[in-house]
Image (cartoon, rainbow, N blue to C red):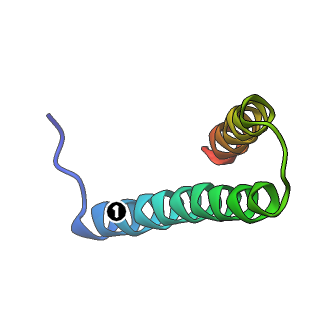
Amino acid sequence: MPVEEPGSLLIATVAFSALVATVVLIHHKVLVRLSSVLGKRGNHHHFRLIVTVLGVLAAHALEVWILP
């Protein structure tokens, strides 16, 4: 196994930590937004569930698209 330079490992760790933080932030913001929008409406439970699932799937698609 080749020995990596310590600087490149540090850069990779910082880069991937920033990537993970970005993905978690996106997921959190989508869930908060969905919660606030759907909480104000008096829609049926099934409608809210479907919108939430589709919103979370859209967030996951965005998160996967961000990955290098």
In this view of the protein, which residue sits in the foreground, 31 or 26? 31
Looking at the image, residue 58 lies above or below residue 36: above
Q: Is residue 47 left or right of residue 13?
A: right
Residue at image location 23% in from the left, 53% down from the top: 4
In this view of the protein, which residue sits in the foreground, 44 or 35? 44
Amino acid type shown at disc 1? Thr
Residue at image location 25% in from the left, 61% down from the top: 5
Q: Assign a secondary structure to mark 1.
A: helix
Measured as percent of width and height from the top left, residue 17 is found at 41, 64
Measured as percent of width and height from the top left, residue 32 is found at 65, 64
Q: Quadrant of the N terminus?
A: top left
Q: Is residue 19 left or right of residue 50?
A: left
Q: Quadrant of the C terminus?
A: top right
Q: Is residue 33 left or right of residue 18?
A: right
Few, some or many residues within 10 Å of mark 1 (<14, 14–19, 20+): few
Tell me the residue that label 1 is attached to: 13
